[in-house]
Amino acid sequence: MLSKIHFLKIPAMFFSKQHYFILYLILCLVASTGFAAEIYRNVDPQGRVTYSDKPSVGARQIEILSQPSRQLHQVARVYDGDTIILDDKKHVRLLGINTPEIESQQREEEPGGVAAKKWLQAQLQDQKVYLEFDQEKRDKYKRLLAHVFLPDGKHLNLALLENGLAIVSIIPPNSLYTDKLIQAQQHAEKLKLGIWSMPEYQSRPITQIANHTKGWQRFTGTPVSIKKSRKYTRLIFSDKVDIRIANTNLKLFPAPTTYLGKPLEIRGWVARNKDYYTMLIQHPSALISR
């Protein structure tokens, strides 16, 4: 099978309508057969347009939506900032992110939850969406897990992060777009957009973990030792606090010893067992060296 598509380097100035239609068919063929993942459009100083599979200065990537891994669906409504409901009543949880909770019978509203839901509703007025699945297609609640794209190519999971309306939440083995999601979060955090400007989501010393509120939290601390069991590797912060990493996910992380004695920011959800506190860390993006 071909791995490159240099035959797409065709000057657009010589195109007729028929030629553009042929180019369209080629792009569809590329998407359906997997010849290449990216197409670039470039305009030179003389106004001549060329297409290539290789990036160059000033070239613009063309989004290919007709990928075999993406499926088109009609949205019925938005449940919350990271969950939509399709017209067939299936729930879709947006992969790689988490937004604050909205008020429900099971939980209280979290700051930023309503803003995330309203933003997503505005994006999905009478819209169809493309769903792109990763390795695990459903979660324990039987919801579909997907990256959600508008027909114009807008990646809604990514856009929620870019606007500071969500945080990165990578749960292996699903890892599509991880680098892009992390970069989007870093940009929003640097600009203090959305939740990054809210006092409820500022980092606090891990010694204050007993005063934590429900939901996603940020703590800072320095691990002093490591404890291993059959299922978990734990970084110990005190006789009352640790964070744990499933041994099956250790391959994603640096060697645990590299964290010892170093200031860290830990991001996630706190679990309590009597007077002991722990946080499950599933991806290195939630464990940041400071």
Image (cartoon, helix red, strand yellow):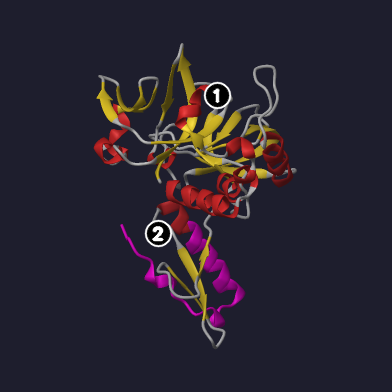
Q: Quadrant of residue 37?
A: bottom left
Is residue 163 or residue 172 the one in the foreground?
A: 163
Residue 35: x and y, percent? 38, 58
**In the image: residue 44, left or right of residue 239:** right
Relative vertical location of residue 179 with respect to residue 147 in this rendering, above or below: below
Looking at the rendered image, the quarter that the N terminus falls into is bottom left
Which disc number belongs to residue 211? 1
Relative vertical location of residue 213 with respect to residue 265 in this rendering, above or below: above
Tell me where the magenta segment starts and ends, as one range.
Answer: 1-28
Which disc number belongs to residue 25? none
Which disc number belongs to residue 36? 2
Give the Cα distance between marks 2 and 1.
51 Å
Q: Dots 2 and 1: beta carbons under 8 Å?
A: no
**In the image: residue 61, left or right of residue 192:** left
Is residue 205 or residue 78 the one in the foreground?
A: 205
Q: What amino acid is found at the position of numbered circle 2 in the picture?
A: Ala
Residue at screen point 25% across, 37% down: 257
Element type where label 1 sits in the image: helix
Residue at screen point 67% across, 40% down: 116
